[in-house]
Image: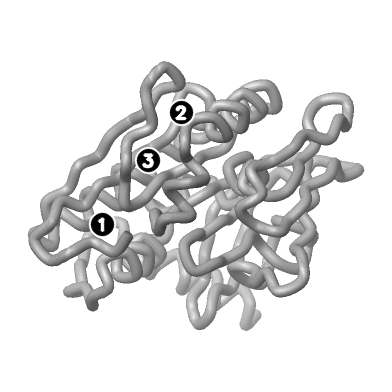
């Protein structure tokens, strides 16, 4: 579902009342604003649990607690979300959203719960909760944010991670999230796209199938400074 030149870019933030614990709904605002600053027409919709699922170019799933995560998974399984993604819609998923898209995830009491099966990943309970800063190398870039989750996510054969962990735990202390042709998934909250504007641009360029004109915003300057600090710390 690539966006034609001149068409409206449709972005949908799904169930912010369930999957919005850490401000991840802000990822939709970032995508929309960075597209608009490049002259694109954008529709940004916040989809509540009582709404029908609209067609969209990009769906965003955030983090949430066990009960809301389970409810969100049930709703997504019933409302045609899997079909939309199979037809070409893109997805940006964070933490609980990342787990929902897999084959299964564990909720309270370590009970295993069936996921949407869009990606061959399984999330189980870890022995300790992962809380703190997260830094991941994604290609030549650094992705920064924070994590707060109790899951350990295992990738199936052929599933590529989003990046390699430099600080924090993410999936397993080695890699963070996963990347498919139409899905970006990470354990980084923040919201991650506000803290990593390059990542928002990478998503937009992929969805729009075009190169983007550079932007210099406060977020870009803050990221450059944060990367400088992290790089200096690694060198030391």
Q: Which residue is mark 1?
A: 218
Whether residue 221 is visible to the viewer of this picture, yes or no, is no
Q: Earlier in the sequence, mark 1 or mark 2?
A: 2
Q: Nearer the viewer, mark 3 or mark 1?
A: 3
Please say if 183 is above or below 60: below
Q: CA distance from mark 1 to mark 2?
A: 28 Å
CB contact under 8 Å: marks 3 and 1: no
Q: Which residue is mark 3?
A: 26
Q: How is the image coloured?
A: one colour
Residue 109 in the image, given as x and y percentages of width and height: 88, 25
Q: Which residue is mark 2?
A: 15
Instruction: Check disc 1: other Cα within 10 Å, few if <14, some if 14-19, many if 20+.
Output: few
Residue 195 in the image, given as x and y percentages of width and height: 42, 55
- Tell me which corner region of the image, top left, top right, bottom left or bottom right, holds residue 100: top right
Q: Earlier in the sequence, mark 3 or mark 1?
A: 3
Q: Residue at x 47, y 70 (%)?
A: 227
Q: Residue at x 40, y 58 (%)?
A: 88
Q: Earlier in the sequence, mark 3 or mark 2?
A: 2
Residue 159 in the image, given as x and y percentages of width and height: 68, 69
Instruction: Check disc 2: other Cα within 10 Å, few if <14, some if 14-19, many if 20+.
Output: many
> Residue 159's mark?
none
Q: Residue at x 61, y 53 (%)?
A: 118
CB contact under 8 Å: marks 3 and 2: no
Question: How many circles with numbers are drawn on the protein?
Answer: 3
């Amino acid at each position: 579902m690539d966006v034609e030149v001149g068409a409206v870019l449709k972005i949908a933030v799904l169930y912010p009342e369930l999957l919005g614990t850490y401000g991840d709904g802000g990822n939709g605002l970032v995508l929309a604003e960075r597209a608009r600053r490049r002259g694109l027409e954008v529709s940004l919709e916040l989809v509540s649990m009582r709404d029908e699922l609209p067609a969209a170019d990009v769906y965003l799933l955030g983090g949430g607690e066990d009960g809301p995560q389970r409810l969100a998974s049930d709703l997504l399984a019933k409302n045609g979300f899997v079909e939309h993604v199979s037809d070409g819609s893109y997805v940006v998923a964070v933490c609980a959203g990342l787990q929902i898209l897999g084959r299964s995830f564990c909720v309270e009491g370590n009970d295993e719960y069936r996921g949407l099966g869009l990606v061959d990943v399984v999330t189980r309970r870890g022995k300790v909760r992962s809380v703190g800063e997260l830094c991941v190398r994604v290609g030549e870039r650094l992705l920064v944010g924070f994590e707060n989750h109790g899951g350990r996510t295992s990738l199936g054969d052929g599933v590529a991670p989003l990046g390699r962990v430099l600080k924090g735990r993410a999936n397993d202390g080695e890699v963070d999230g996963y990347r498919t042709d139409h899905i970006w998934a990470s354990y980084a909250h923040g919201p991650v796209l506000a803290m990593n504007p390059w990542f928002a641009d990478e998503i937009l360029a992929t969805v729009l199938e075009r190169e983007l004109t550079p932007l210099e915003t406060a977020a870009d300057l803050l990221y450059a400074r944060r990367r400088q600090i992290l790089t200096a710390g690694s060198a030391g």
